[in-house]
Amino acid sequence: EAMPSLRVLRCTRNKIHQIPNALPSALCILELGDNNIQGTFTTLESFPELRELCLRGNALCEIRDDFFRLQKLEKLDVSGNPSIMLPSSLSNLLHLDLSGTTLISSKLGTMASAKTLCSLSAARCRLNDITDLLAISYPNLIYLDLRHHKHCS
């Protein structure tokens, strides 16, 4: 590895289409927000220490189930990805930002697996029915942002 001690990498607004291959495995924070990453996002298994991942403002439509092999991931920001399907398990996450995304009620079962969440931001989300989101049990939740909710059908 060229930079084996690198722990934080911020690559926002660089017109990146995919995650670069030659990143140091010791990364704890990876910011790839406001780029051109599209489609399905798969695992980052080569980053076992990753704690924070920012994918804000891309064009992702799905995060695969194998993505959550990242056992130390605590913070995930997928805000601003217009319509995103989350993996079936969100275990270990403490902070999740879904602001500006479309949440379809039929996909909200995923959220029920997020028992460790302390912070959930769903501001400016398009949601069929806000009561569906509120009905899910989050025993550790201390911050919930539902500002500017938009109804979708």
Image (cartoon, rainbow, N blue to C red):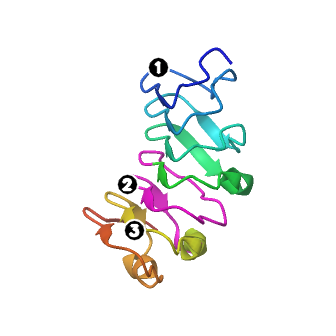
Residue type at mark 3: give it.
Cys
Location of the N terminus (image quadrant)? top right
Look at the magenta stretch and give its main secondary structure.
Answer: loop
Numbered label attached to residue 99: 2
Q: What's the distance in space between the residues labelled 3 and 1, CA to CA?
A: 31 Å
Q: Earlier in the sequence, mark 3 or mark 1?
A: 1
**Which percent across, then down, holds residue 119?**
37, 64
Residue that protrudes farthest toward the front in the picture? 5
Q: Is residue 89 magenta?
A: yes
**Which percent across, then down, holds residue 95?**
43, 59
Residue type at mark 2: give it.
Ser
Q: Name the residue under label 1.
A: 14
Q: Mark 3 points at which residue?
A: 118
Quadrant of the rendered structure where residue 65 is?
bottom right
Quadrant of the rendered structure where residue 48 is?
top right
Give the class, few, some or many, for how many residues have Cα within 10 Å of label 2's Cα (few <14, many ≥20). many
Is 35 placed above or below 98 here? above
Q: Which residue is depicted at the point 69% across and 23% down?
A: 21
Cβ atoms under marks 1 and 2 closer than 8 Å: no
Q: Which residue is depicted at the point 53% across and 25% down?
A: 6
Q: What's the distance in space between the residues labelled 2 and 3, CA to CA?
A: 16 Å
